[in-house]
């Protein structure tokens, strides 16, 4: 809703118009999502080989010994060396800290999993939102333009053929996705692109890469490699560490989220159709390519830390649109918060569904996502979907 | 306001009445010279020596299906690069305009449009300000005023807060027209704006375009299906046959039984009323 600035007063109306597009429903969505993430996070940190009650977990998260010692979280966030240096620069104590066992487990081992779930959810959700606008197709997902097939193939090639490079797997996976995306763009380009050609090119590349992936599976004899490949290609948060937080956080905070929020108006105009966007003075091809690249970067960030988690990018923008309408400023901001909520909850499910073992989170998102999509399809009037 | 002043977004909105964002005195003219348009090389869809869309007037492109009307319109908007020849907008090759620069001066309403269903009429109209806003700018007060004016001119201010998804086809088209009006260009191209509308909304679209032309001197070029409607509405007609102008000029001179037979393939009677020619089609002419 656009508010017309009142004639009296200068600063207040300006401030008000800067946030006026955040309406009650969007605010509710944001707060609700935060609450869900917090609840799921608490459940998550209380489970594991060393069991503790939710209350213990809560106490550990808010352990004053951690919060009064900024050097400790800084070291976790930035790595040992850099964290210590930054703490010293900021004038915090760098003396060794003695923490309770619960706090060490929760902060050192379990919290990163929640944080990675949040980062993965955010990136996949905004990536899906962007691709749905760029292709003008509400069934588009971050993986529609060949990204998942490219990443999957890169993962298998690394594990099966070039096993020496396994340490660089996250980078290689994200790179494979980016290469597949470039290939899709090249195939779709004929003096310009259009959404239909892009989607078709995505199908072509996905099909070929998918077959090659399956072929590689066929030639793999080592069961451990197969399992590792499966957990990468279905997406898993098992065993993630602060290292993964350090990989994904900078990209998310500095690039993918701000760039997508900035691009929201362009996405709104793209949604009016290419001809209209052009007649309004947009360089459609350039904007479409750059926004797609941001979306691939977001998808790649998620893939690098968790593998290919399906359905989040498809479903979250849908859920958000149902709640806040189709203005992309609201859709993007809503997705930034709703994505983490979905992944955090799904990851709790992945941990608790089968006692004694942990499922890859991608299996849970797929199991939850499918029926939700069916519900959407039934609920929406015939003809729209 | 002096001539030659660039239509820079907010500066030109200084007029006290708020209604006179004027074009710099002289509205732009569109002119095509030695033009060949094609989608595939060697298969021209439009070929013409010279054609003018006069400044500050309403010109209708008419002709049967496939005669090249919409193609010609696309070349005027630099959407389609000519295989040969040049289209001049305000004396300059349209290809030399930057996309934003052209969009500040030349608007286009396409034939069929879809917007996300929950977009309100006002939000849609606000997109018309796109070429006037910088990447980081939010809507200025000047933008808001332009949007208000556009909504009022088109007569959709009463439904401004309703989502377009819930509107009739005719109301939706008016909302889109409001978007192009909010663009506040000096010239406007309308590609079959009335084709899918009921009679009431056809007339509302045409009336709004006519009023915009009369009040702001905007050059309007419109593709119309119905030659009778075109004859009543436009100052000039350009009748296209097989990609070539068959005749052009004021409706009184252009609309003749011969033209209707040669271009449209119908035998018709043409009467002359005070409001231009009236056409009564009788029967189709058999192809030979």
Image: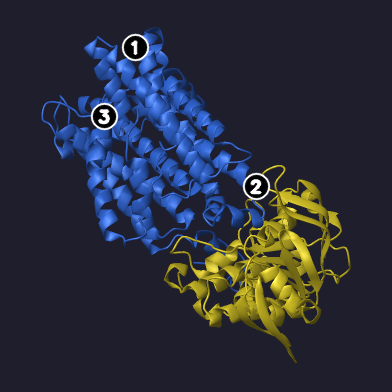
Chain colours: A blue, B yellow
Question: In the picture shown, does residue A80 fall above or below A7?
Answer: above
Q: Position of residue A207 (x, y in %)?
A: 39, 29
Which residue has dot 1 on it?
A160
Q: How many marks?
A: 3
Pick the front one: A228 or B141: A228
CA separation, marks 1 and 3?
Answer: 30 Å
Work out whether mark 1 precedes mark 2 in sequence or the reverse, and give the earlier one: 1
Give the Cα separation between the discs numbered 3 and 2.
46 Å
Q: Within 10 angstroms of label 3, few (less than 14), some, or many (20 or more) residues?
A: many
Q: Viewer-proximal residue, A76 or B8? A: B8
Q: Which mark is residue A283?
A: 2
Q: Nearer the viewer, mark 1 or mark 3?
A: 1
Q: Residue at x 46, y 38 (%)?
A: A200
Q: CA distance from mark 1 to mark 2?
A: 43 Å
Instruction: Decide if residue A76 is in sight here.
Output: no
In the picture, measured across the screen, residue B197 lies left or right of residue B262, that is left
Question: Considering only vertical position in the picture, is A112 above or below A276?
Answer: above
Instruction: Look at the numbered discs 1 and 3 and tell me whether their residues touch, using CB distance below 8 Å.
Output: no
Identify the residue shown where x is 79% and y is 82%.
B252
Between B107 and B145, the one lying in front of the other is B107
Residue at image mark 3: A110
User: Which residue is drawn at the image coordinates 79% and 72% (left, top)?
Assistant: B22
Indicate the position of residue A186 as horizontal and vertical percent values: 56, 31
């Amino acid at each position: 809703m656009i508010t017309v600035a009142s004639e009296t007063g200068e600063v207040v109306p300006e401030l008000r118009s800067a946030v006026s597009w955040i309406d009650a429903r969007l605010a509710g969505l944001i707060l609700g999502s935060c609450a869900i993430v917090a609840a799921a996070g608490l459940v998550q940190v209380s489970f594991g080989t060393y069991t503790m009650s939710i209350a213990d977990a809560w106490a550990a998260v808010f352990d004053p010994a951690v919060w009064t010692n900024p050097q400790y979280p800084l070291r976790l966030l930035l790595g040992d060396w850099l964290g210590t240096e930054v703490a010293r620069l900021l004038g915090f104590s760098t003396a060794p800290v003695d923490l309770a066992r619960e706090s060490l487990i929760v902060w050192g081992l379990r919290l990163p999993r929640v944080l990675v779930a949040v980062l993965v959810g955010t990136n996949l959700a905004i990536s899906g939102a962007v691709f749905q606008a760029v292709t003008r197709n509400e069934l588009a997902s971050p993986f529609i333009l060949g990204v998942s097939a490219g990443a999957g193939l890169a993962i298998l090639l690394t594990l099966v053929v070039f096993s020496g490079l396994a340490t660089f797997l996250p980078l290689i996976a994200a790179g494979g996705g980016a290469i597949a995306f470039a290939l899709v763009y090249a195939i779709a380009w004929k003096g310009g692109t259009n959404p239909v050609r892009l989607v078709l090119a995505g199908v072509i590349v996905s099909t070929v890469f998918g077959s090659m992936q399956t072929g590689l599976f066929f030639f793999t004899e080592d069961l451990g490699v197969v399992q590792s490949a499966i957990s990468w290609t279905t997406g898993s948060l098992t065993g993630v560490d602060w290292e993964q937080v350090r990989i994904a956080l900078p990209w998310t905070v500095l690039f993918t989220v701000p760039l997508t929020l900035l691009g929201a108006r362009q996405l709104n105009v793209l949604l009016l159709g290419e001809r209209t966007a052009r007649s309004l003075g947009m360089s459609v091809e350039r904007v479409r390519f750059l926004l797609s690249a941001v979306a691939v970067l977001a998808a790649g960030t998620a893939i690098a830390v968790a593998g290919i988690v399906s359905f989040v990018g498809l479903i979250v923008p849908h859920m958000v649109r149902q709640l806040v309408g189709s203005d992309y400023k609201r859709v993007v901001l809503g997705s930034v918060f709703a994505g983490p909520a979905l992944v955090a909850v799904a990851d709790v499910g992945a941990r608790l569904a089968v006692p004694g073992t942990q499922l890859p989170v991608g299996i849970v998102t797929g199991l939850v996502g499918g029926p939700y999509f069916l519900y959407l399809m039934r609920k929406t009037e015939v003809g729209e979907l | 306001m002096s001539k030659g002043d660039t239509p820079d977004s907010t500066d030109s909105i200084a007029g006290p009445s708020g209604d006179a964002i004027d074009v710099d005195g002289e509205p732009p003219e569109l002119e095509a010279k030695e033009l060949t348009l094609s989608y595939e090389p060697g298969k021209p869809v439009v070929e013409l020596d010279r054609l003018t869309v006069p400044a500050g007037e309403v010109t209708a492109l008419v002709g049967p299906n496939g005669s090249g009307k919409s193609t010609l319109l696309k070349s005027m908007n630099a959407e389609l690069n000519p295989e040969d020849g040049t289209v001049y907008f305000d004396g300059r090759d349209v290809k030399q305009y930057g996309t934003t620069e052209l969009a500040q001066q030349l608007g286009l309403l396409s034939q069929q449009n879809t917007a996300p269903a929950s977009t309100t009429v006002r939000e849609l109209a606000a997109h018309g300000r796109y070429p006037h806003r910088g990447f980081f700018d939010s809507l200025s007060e000047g933008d808001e005023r332009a949007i208000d004016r556009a909504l009022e001119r088109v007569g959709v201010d009463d439904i401004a807060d309703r989502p377009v998804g819930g509107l009739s086809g005719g109301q939706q088209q008016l909302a889109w027209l409001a978007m192009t009006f909010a663009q506040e260009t000096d010239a406007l191209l309308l590609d079959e704006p009335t084709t899918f509308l009921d009679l009431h909304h056809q007339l509302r679209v045409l009336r709004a375009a006519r009023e915009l032309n009369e009040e702001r001197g905007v050059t309007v070029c419109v593709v119309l299906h119905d030659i009778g409607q075109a004859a009543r509405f436009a100052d000039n007609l350009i009748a296209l046959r097989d990609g070539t102008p068959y005749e052009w000029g004021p409706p009184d001179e252009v609309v003749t039984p011969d033209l209707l037979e040669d271009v449209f393939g119908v035998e018709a009677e043409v009467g002359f009323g005070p409001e231009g020619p009236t056409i009564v089609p009788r029967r189709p002419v058999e192809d030979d």
